[in-house]
Image (spheres, grey):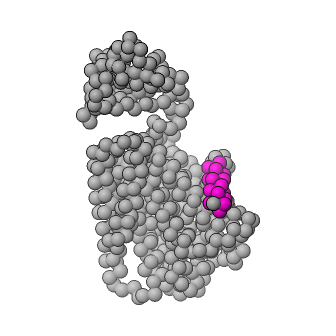
Amino acid sequence: MGDVTVVLGVGAAVLLISVIAVRVSTRLGLPSLLLYLGIGVLLGEAAFGIKFDDADLTQSLGIAALVLILTEGGITTRWNAVKSSLWLGVALSTVAVVVSVAVTGTALHFLLGLDWRMALLWGAVLSSTDAAAVFSVLRSLGVGPRLTGALELESGLNDAPVYIAVVLLASSDAISWTAPLLVIYELGVGALIGVALGYLGGAGLRRAALPSTGLYPLATVAVCVMAYTAGDLAHASGFLATYVAALVLGNARLPHRADTLSFAEGLGWLAQIGLFVLLGLYASPSRLLDVLFPALVAGVVLTFVGRPLSVFLASLPFKVPWREQVFLSWSGLRGAVPIVFALIPLIQGVEGARELVDVVFVLVIVLTVVQGTTLPFLARRLGLVKAGEAQEVQVDSSPLDELGAELLQVHIQRGSKLHGVYMTELRLPIGATVSLVVRSGKSFTPQPTTRLQTDDQLLIVTTEEARDAAERRVRAVDRAGRYARWKGESGD
């Protein structure tokens, strides 16, 4: 019991500090993942002395966190905002990956003396952009939807081909001519599984009558995690299945969609915090100085050769202006994904894999500082920031808090005395009003002559001061009907 108490206490403290770090990083203009990594390093051998070097557990927890991060990214991505960038995003997540691996691997083979397979493995690990880093930085920049959509799709889709490339290159088996066919199968089937589960999950949730609104977000996330499992069991890409399923669900007519979006966002933050703290805890600062030179060489090659050339070739059919190509090249943000993927060859016992993990860790820190802090400045200098770019407002978050308002949902059950009551007879207190009625799957704004019916769902907007009185009045009419006051029913 004592150990559990300590673990819960330390975990809660780390989570609170990490949440505060989000605010601090925003004010300092630094990506929050650096602070999370720093917290993990401090908890490890650098300060508090917690020794954690289990690569298998780190990779397993890392993949689980990536599934949740991809789920959050897909659910919160608006299809209307990214559909115009679909094929550019697909090209960046496939063609650009192949070019980046080839160019970076070739350069590292000659510059660092790595054998061809290890050099290409370095290129593959480093070619994946990080969904968490991209989502957190780009959505607040005010860049146009074409670029933002392309980069969001790239970061959500390119984990799948990169993971396949890393697994193939880390294996001791010879790479045969069937490898491209295997990649096509895994990506194609993974996408189909994602579409199927996303569509079926959305249809099922719309027909489900769950007893609590809090169950709908849980069920939505469960469908996305199930997509990963189904893809993996089918020997297809579980990462791609997860992101596609989340994308389909996030743009479907889900019950309590705003609650689902908020829950997914919170779960995504929790996964990011846990993953980066874990990776910081796993890192060994004493070894990082030894790999500083190869890390910087790899970073220069990737940033100034591999990424720009891959973006140029991938975007060539789409006639992307040079300013946008420069921005796309500099927006290849790295984060936890390359570190997690670098653990794959380490677990398989590939010679030199330990150095690769350390190099990737250093490179993630350096590129995050350099690219993450300069990206807003670069966007403004290139003239890509569009003032007043429309952004989706979540009605269950800050806007209602600022207005001092709350939302109440009422479902008129069979046998309720609310059935047959006119709006004028409901007599809600001042500060509360029925703003929407949903009847037989169709919603409308009620009029004074609107008569309530069984199975109607009411959305009541109320001030904080009037909330208790509004709830009591609804309960009173539910129990005693339109003459509740005359019958002495107060709703308490």
Q: Quadrant of residue 437?
A: top left
Task: Count the labels in the image.
Answer: 0
Tell me what residue is drawn at x 40 percent, y 32 percent: 409
Residue 486, given in percent of the width and then of the height, sits at 38, 11
Q: Is residue 365 magenta?
A: no
- The main secondary structure of the magenta stretch is helix
Q: Quadrant of the N terminus?
A: bottom right
Tell me what residue is drawn at x 58 percent, y 84 percent: 352
Instruction: Look at the image and tell me whether residue 111 can be seen.
Output: no
Q: Is residue 470 left or right of residue 202?
A: right
- Residue closest to the eye, 172 or 476: 476
- Residue closest to the eye, 160 or 114: 160
Tell me what residue is drawn at x 54 percent, y 53 percent: 269
Instruction: Look at the image and tell me whether residue 376 can be seen.
Output: yes
Residue 396, given in percent of the width and then of the height, sits at 47, 37
In the rendered image of this protein, does residue 326 appear above or below residue 94?
A: above
Tell me what residue is drawn at x 33 percent, y 16 percent: 482
Residue 443, given in percent of the width and then of the height, sits at 30, 31
Q: Is residue 420 left or right of residue 231?
A: left
Q: Is residue 192 left or right of residue 356?
A: left
Start-end of magenta stretch: 2-22
In the rendered image of this protein, does residue 150 appear above or below residue 313?
A: above
